[in-house]
Amino acid sequence: MPAPSKLKAYRAKREFSKTPEPVGGSVAAEGNRFVVHKHHATADHYDLRLQVGDVLKSWAVPRGPSLNPADKRLAVETEDHPLEYIDFEGVIPEGEYGGGPMIVWDTGVWAPMDDVEKSLRTGSFKFRLAGEKLNGGWMLTRLKPKPGEDEGKKNWLLFKERDLAADARLDILEARPESVKSGRRIEELVAKPAARPAKPVALKPGALPGAVKAPLPSRIEPQLAT
């Protein structure tokens, strides 16, 4: 179970009585899983999340991952997420933090190529993915803040290593837009409207096609089941 301080920023941004997102803290920290979410919020983007101990280290990738090693994609480090978020797919209500639909675009296991804490500290983070869409070696390199830029905002570059899983011709985002969890595209994932009680409709028998005005029978003969 993660220390409360690790999820403090995550929980402070969300009102769990309104969002279906997990509060976190109930899943044992076992294995090295990863997930890539596709998120249609204020701006479309992808979220790379790697299990590091009892939380998910997270980066928002506006243009999404690319299998082309020449493509360097901006990855903005965000708050740690709970492990339960690996399986989260749904619609965050509008008006809430990150409001919009989110799908599990890819998931699997990952392995670091060096000590994780050291890699995160130095800003040179090599790792391997074994997912349904993303595989092989990857690299996250932290950028130095520009003059006047918020030093608390950590920008990285995400790019593919040159290996057998690299492909300069395939746009994996276009070729495989669907969720690996539900098979649905993000456009198909919409919030279910609250059910409303049907209004009673007063029917006028005389208005029904074929209706003939006649007195009610004084007695109705029972019918036997056949």
Image (spheres, rainbow, N blue to C red):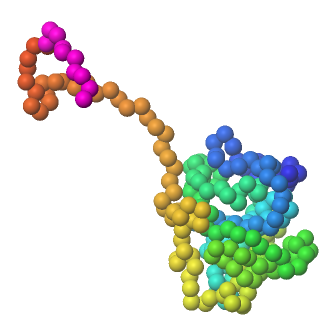
Q: Is residue 108 left or right of residue 173?
A: right
User: Which residue corresponds to the image point at 66% horizontal and 39% vertical from the top-left?
Assistant: 17
Q: Give the x, y percent position of residue 157.
A: 74, 78
Instruction: Give above or below for 98 relative to 105.
Output: above
User: Which residue corresponds to the image point at 52% horizontal and 77% vertical from the top-left?
Assistant: 174
Prevailing secondary structure class for the magenta stretch in the rendered image: loop
User: Which residue corresponds to the image point at 57% horizontal and 52% vertical from the top-left?
Assistant: 91
Q: Is residue 174 left or right of residue 87?
A: left
Quadrant position of residue 56:
bottom right
State whether residue 55 appears in this view: yes
Furthest residue toward top:
218
User: Which residue corresponds to the image point at 26% horizontal and 26% vertical from the top-left?
Assistant: 225
Q: Is residue 222 magenta?
A: yes
Q: Give the x, y percent position of residue 199.
A: 35, 29
Q: Give the x, y percent position of residue 40.
A: 57, 61
Q: Nearer the viewer, residue 87 or 125?
A: 87
State whether residue 5 appears in this view: no
Q: Which residues are magenta?
A: 217-226
